[in-house]
Image: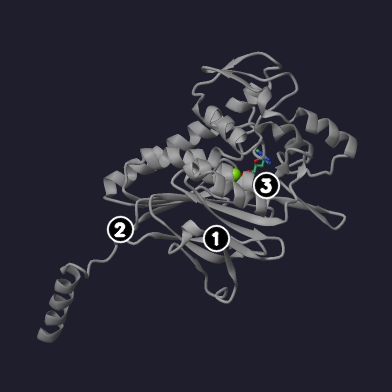
Amino acid sequence: MKKRLLCALLALSLLTLPGCKRDPEPVEFSTFAMDTMMSFTLYGDKEKCAIARSTIGMILSDYEAALSATREDGGIAKVNRADGQPVELGSPQLLERTLELCEVTGGALDITAYPAVKAWGFTQEEHQVPSPAELAELVEKIDYTAIKLEGDTVTLPAGVEIDLGAVAKGYVGDVLAGQIGLTSALLDLGQSTITAVGAKPDGSPWRVGVVDPARPGACFAVVELEDMAMGTSGGYQRYFEQDGEIYWHILDPDTAAPARSGLASVTVASPSAFLCDGLSTALFVMGLEDGAQFWRDHPELDFEAVFVTETGEIYRTAGLEGRFSLAEGYEDREVKVLE
Ligand code: ADP
Ligand code: MG
């Protein structure tokens, strides 16, 4: 009996010794928002986590309404229905920053691709392949420079419609990270858009998997993140098949058709989740060569990238050194480093 008591005391003292502390239990929950399943892992004292959880709920429901192009009451849906008339926005920052990103990516990101996204049936999941004549007409409508943003007021020419789907989740990730009031959390906004707040409670970085586009149930690599976000765009995320051909949801603004750049996925890591989301879409459209050159030309954007080609080749930018590793089962794959 005495022995057992001694053991229990010893175990208790070991647990309280510095260095023997175990991570506290996280608060974990999932919720469906912005058309996808989101999961959250929060560390902190009970009260702070409870406040963070309700903050997350409120921010998601506010932004879901404000940014939706598909919901009847969606803020962007209202802009799209304005038929050439000016519309006042509650907060124009996201549109302003997105237009800058459209410009800096040379139009690889173009939020006026929305009529084409609809024509392919990606908004209502009733897929179809538009005819060449329809595509030619749709291309004419894609031109982000036609959007007029003056102060809080946006005006679209009649027939032009926008969709912030390529950047919305990342933007909301940044908003959440700034407002949850925690120093350690992992915010998984779904479809491979993840924001790491701080490090794990033990001080080590968060380790986030990169999905293998050839086997979307598996991850081929792990990236270590601390106060960083990561986003992946890939043809495997949303697509349909018709007559043996696969058509995905990332469109080339020059053709209004799925972007066929030779890439299967692009992952971007950056302190800004907004940039991760927007740039992963844009680099997917650009392809490997132009995408790598874009990375070299824009050090001020402060991002790194991982490209996977349709033939399964893996490329990563040099800045991921020490933070990128191949996952179990993929150790023998070659990774080419872009300098
Ligand atoms: P997901 O939304 O699945 O995370 P992305 O971030 O890559 O994927 O965004 C793709 C979405 O953005 C599409 O569903 C479509 O609504 C829109 N989109 C498609 N192509 C483009 C493009 N070239 N520029 C801007 N938005 C696009
Ligand atoms: Mg994106």
Q: Are marks 3 and 1 in contact (CB under 8 Å)?
A: no
- Give amino acid for label 2: Pro
Q: Nearer the viewer, mark 2 or mark 1?
A: 1
**If the image is split into quadrants, where does the N terminus sit?**
bottom left
State which quadrant residue 143 falls in. top right
Q: CA distance from mark 2 to mark 3?
A: 38 Å
Camera sees residue 195? no
Q: Nearer the viewer, residue 201 or 14?
A: 201
Q: Which residue is mark 3?
A: 286
Q: Secondary structure at mark 3?
A: helix
Between tags 3 and 1, which lies in front?
3
- Residue 290: give x, y in percent of width and height: 66, 49
**What is the crowding at mark 2: few (fewer than 14 residues within 10 Å), some, or many (at least 20)?**
some
Say which residue appears at 53% left-offset and 31% top-offset.
Answer: 97
**Amino acid tagged 1:** Val
Q: Which residue is mark 1?
A: 210
- Its colouring scheme is one colour
Q: Quadrant of ligand 2?
A: top right
Question: Which residue: 66% across, 53% down?
Answer: 289
SS at circle 2: loop
The relative height of residue 291 versus residue 224 in the rendered view (above or below) is above
Q: Which sits in the foreground, 178 or 302?
A: 302
In the image, is residue 339 above or below residue 176? Answer: below
Badge number at residue 201:
2
Q: Which mark is residue 230?
A: none
